[in-house]
Image (cartoon, rainbow, N blue to C red):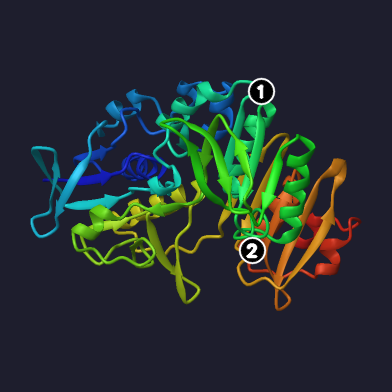
Amino acid sequence: MAGIVVVGAGQAGAALVARLRAKGYDGPLTLIGAEPVPPYQRPPLTKGYLTGAMPLDRLLLRSESFYTEHRIDLRLGQRVTGIDAARRTLRLGDTELSYDQLALTTGSIPRQLPESMGGALGSVYVARDLADADAMAPEFVPGRRVLIVGGGYIGLEAAAVAASKGLSVTVIEMAPRILQRVAAPETSDYFRALHQRYGVEILEGTGLERLLGNGQVTGARLTDGREIEVDFVIVGVGIVPAVALAEAAGVALDNGIATDAQGRTSDPAIWAAGDCASFPFRGGRLRLESVQNAIDQAELVADNMLGAGRDYAPVPWFWSDQYDVKLQIAGLNSGYDRVHRREGASGAVSFWYYTGGTFIAVDAMNDPRSFMVGKRLLEMGRNVDPALVSDPATDLRSLLK
């Protein structure tokens, strides 16, 4: 029996193998990771880990002993170089490994600046994995100047850490406003004001023409013609799904590795979950980049590998920590045409998204009750009158009755 092999030892891969054992799978089980450390949490890398508040042992999702105790063959620091789908084998360097079923949880790859824009200069970083965080950590010295390219959540989280540690921070965003692709103007306004209170310079509608320096970055020329001096740069301009293995194996792609509603790819012996996978959703296809999706989708795939036959129908949720603000998001706001504001206690605020009169998502800043109620309403498929949501006198819990 060749058993089950999982390629990609991130949040999804770790959740998938744990679920298989929890659901009674007793056959050979292998988890392969390219990094030399056991599966760990990625969100704290640009927050607690970078500040030193969260050491490496607290980043780990499980201790190494868990894998040994559950007879999971954890292969770290190994990279799969090819898949022979016809023979159901994969290559690990000079060795070959057989599988009965294969799960791809290969995650995603950060977009890099091209060399023509100075992307190969020293002290230019992306923020995706542990090695990235370790490499940039020595740069976070009070008084140093950091340029952050990209005003999405990754860039803004890094900006918050840098500003909190006393660095001089500039964020440039090519779009007209920060968070434009993921949030309403109201949420953008909230976080712009938050960062400006901490001294962060935010330049919107401003792109990077190129980085400057001879071997080491020393400055940046922006698209508005100005030049600024910098000591290091963090690039946060998005990620792309890691699909090279699947593509080479002949597996169908569509905004990632295309799966059916149960997580199976075009090859009946190969499954996919997490950042790398897209799935049917509301008449189209959706790929989610979140911890919640990585865990939930991976656990569903594990169940279906064992014959459960369940479809994936998530209510997506996300979060971001910046300074003393915790942003929690429930639902997907794509297609919204109205946003309603709700004031909460002690400076809490939430923005409720509607399309055609239907509630579709909520952004909650330091307002866990709005998040939890909004999430529950979406799970129940229940609409809510925006006038009630906007009225601070409304007891949100009453909307669930």
The mark that comes first in sequence, 1 or 2, is 1
Nearer to us in this view, 365 or 205: 205
Residue 62 percent across, percent down from the top left: 41, 29
Residue 398 percent across, percent down from the top left: 81, 59
**Which residue corresponds to mark 2?**
378
**Which residue corresponds to mark 1?**
143
Residue 21 percent across, percent down from the top left: 31, 40
Nearer to us in this view, 182 or 15: 182
Q: Is residue 245 visible?
A: yes
Nearer to us in this view, 38 or 382: 38
Find the distance from the CA under tag 1 to the CA under tag 2: 45 Å
Element at label 2: helix
Residue 363, picture quadrant:
bottom right
Instruction: Please state which amino acid type lies under the numbered disc 2.
Output: Leu
Q: Residue at x 34, y 61 (%)?
A: 263
Element at label 1: loop
Q: Residue at x 39, y 39 (%)?
A: 120
Q: Residue at x 50, y 39 (%)?
A: 212
Compared with 134, 364 (above or below) is: below
Q: Residue at x 45, y 39 (%)?
A: 128
Residue 18, picture quadrant:
top left
Horizontal relation, residue 373 to residue 231: left or right: right
Badge 2 crowding class, 10 Å Cα cut-off, few under 14, some 14 to 19, many 20 or more, is: many
Horizontal relation, residue 319 to residue 112: left or right: right
Residue farthest along the right direction in this orientation = 393
Compared with 218, 378 (above or below) is: below
